[in-house]
Amino acid sequence: MSPDYFEFYGLPESFQPDAPALKSRYYALSREYHPDFHATASPERQQEILQLATLNTNAYRTLSNPDQRMAYILSRHGLLEEGKQEMPADFLMEVMDLNEQLMELEFEPDPTIVQRVEQETQALTETLDAGIAPVLAGYEGLPADVRPQALEQIRTYYLKKRYLLRIHESLAKFATRS
């Protein structure tokens, strides 16, 4: 299992951690584990310091990025394993419709269709973001027995967002062609 970055920083698991506290812990540990300050230590201690410095960098990189943080938390709870990626049928139908429109654009470029798909994708993204915002904000305060339900909602949001990101990327390719 991957290291517990929240425990490493002494912070509670949260989808919206205290950004100043996170940055403060990162900088404090960066100073504490900087290899230059341990140049006279034994080779074993120097190796340990190097590992701690790497852990610190990886922890900060992951926890300071909302998408990476979400994937990290979901992975730690075993919710991003292969084969557990089922999606609601209604959402898949919407995405399939958008993908079909994108495929049509391959053969017949049409700025009007590109704009319509962009608007539909943006509306879906905004609806998803608005729906999950209270769950993300309140996760840290949830009792342990309720957290699994919240994590399932967040997992579904995360997977839907990845689908929509792929559509956004496809749209960006069409934009560069025009």
Image (cartoon, rainbow, N blue to C red):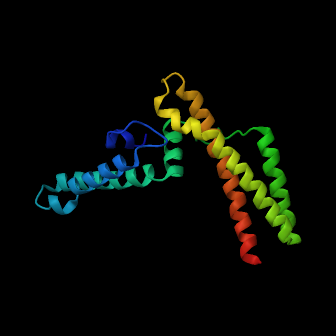
Q: Nearer the viewer, residue 13 or 128?
A: 128
Q: Kindly indicate the quadrant of the structure image that contains residue 3.
A: top left
Task: Work out whether 154 lies above or below 119.
Answer: above
**Horizontal and vertical percent position of residue 2:** 42, 43
Q: How many marks?
A: 0
Q: Nearer the viewer, residue 134 or 26?
A: 134
Question: Is residue 4 in sight in this rendering?
Answer: no
Could you tell me which residue is drawn at 22 percent across and 59 percent down? 34
Could you tell me which residue is drawn at 32 percent across and 42 percent down? 8
Give the farthest residue toward the left: 40
Task: Work out whether 116 lies above or below 83.
Answer: below
Question: Is residue 64 in sight in this rendering?
Answer: yes
Q: Kindly indicate the quadrant of the structure image that contains residue 105.
A: bottom right
Query: Is 121 left or right of 112, judged from the image as shown?
Result: left
- The quadrant of the picture occupied by the C terminus is bottom right
Query: Is 141 left or right of 160, judged from the image as shown?
Result: left
Q: Nearer the viewer, residue 138 or 169?
A: 138
Q: Nearer the viewer, residue 77 or 147?
A: 147
**Horizontal and vertical percent position of residue 170:** 72, 64
Query: Is 38 left or right of 3, judged from the image as shown?
Result: left
**Horizontal and vertical percent position of residue 104:** 87, 64
Could you tell me which residue is drawn at 79 percent across and 39 percent down? 89
Query: Is 58 left or right of 166, judged from the image as shown?
Result: left
Give the farthest residue toward the top: 145
- The quadrant of the picture occupied by the N terminus is top left
Task: Work out whether 113 lies above or below 151.
Answer: below
Task: Work out whether 39 lies above or below 21.
Answer: below
Give the farthest residue toward the bottom: 178
Could you tell me which residue is drawn at 53 percent across and 40 percent down? 74
